[in-house]
Image (tube, rainbow, N blue to C red):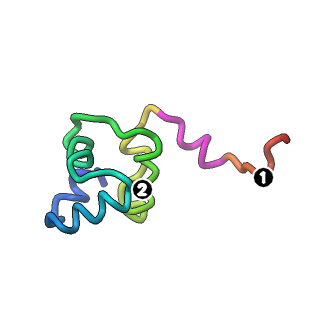
Amino acid sequence: MNLHDYIKPFDKQTLNSFAASCGTTAGQLKQVAYGYRRPGAALAISIERESSRAVTCEEMRPDIDWAYLRSTDPSKAAA
């Protein structure tokens, strides 16, 4: 699901609450949802987390190799 479809049914209060839980503003979320801005990696991660993966990082930022990051186990990284 894309961000626009996810936030479309939200009323103003729900949108503001969702935006705050993502660490951003409703205005910024709308800019991303309508394609006027691209979310940074941190915001994409927050949106995926707060939407319970209804909106994925891969959908918002296909230019980032999320598959590599998701398969990386930091506990196995060299010290």
Q: CA distance from mark 1 to mark 2?
A: 23 Å
Q: Residue at x 78, y 52 (%)?
A: 75
* Image x and y of residue 33, in percent: 24, 46
Secondary-structure class at tag 1: helix
The three-letter code of the residue at mark 2 reads Glu
User: Which image quarter: residue 28?
Assistant: top left
Say whether residue 4 is left or right of residue 73.
left
| Residue neighbourhood size for the residue with mark 1, other residues' Cα within 10 Å, grouped as few (<14), some (14–19), many (≥20) | few
What span is colored magenta in the figure? 64-71
Q: Residue at x 53, y 42 (%)?
A: 66
* Image x and y of residue 73, in percent: 72, 50
Query: Could you tell me which quadrant the C terminus lies in?
Result: top right
Instruction: Tell me, for residue 48, which label it has, or none.
Output: 2
* Image x and y of residue 29, in percent: 26, 49
Q: Residue at x 68, y 46 (%)?
A: 72
> Dots 1 and 2: beta carbons under 8 Å?
no
> Earlier along the polypeptide chain: callout 1 or callout 2?
2
Residue 68 part of the magenta-drawn span? yes
**Outermost residue, right side:** 79
The three-letter code of the residue at mark 1 reads Ser
Quick one: 78 or 23, which is closer to the camera? 23
Instruction: Tell me, for residue 75, which label it has, or none.
Output: 1
Residue 17 part of the magenta-drawn span? no
| Residue neighbourhood size for the residue with mark 2, other residues' Cα within 10 Å, grouped as few (<14), some (14–19), many (≥20) | many
Quick one: 55 or 14, which is closer to the camera? 14
Say whether residue 13 is left or right of residue 64.
left
Question: Is 36 situated above or below 59?
Answer: above
Q: Residue at x 49, y 35 (%)?
A: 64
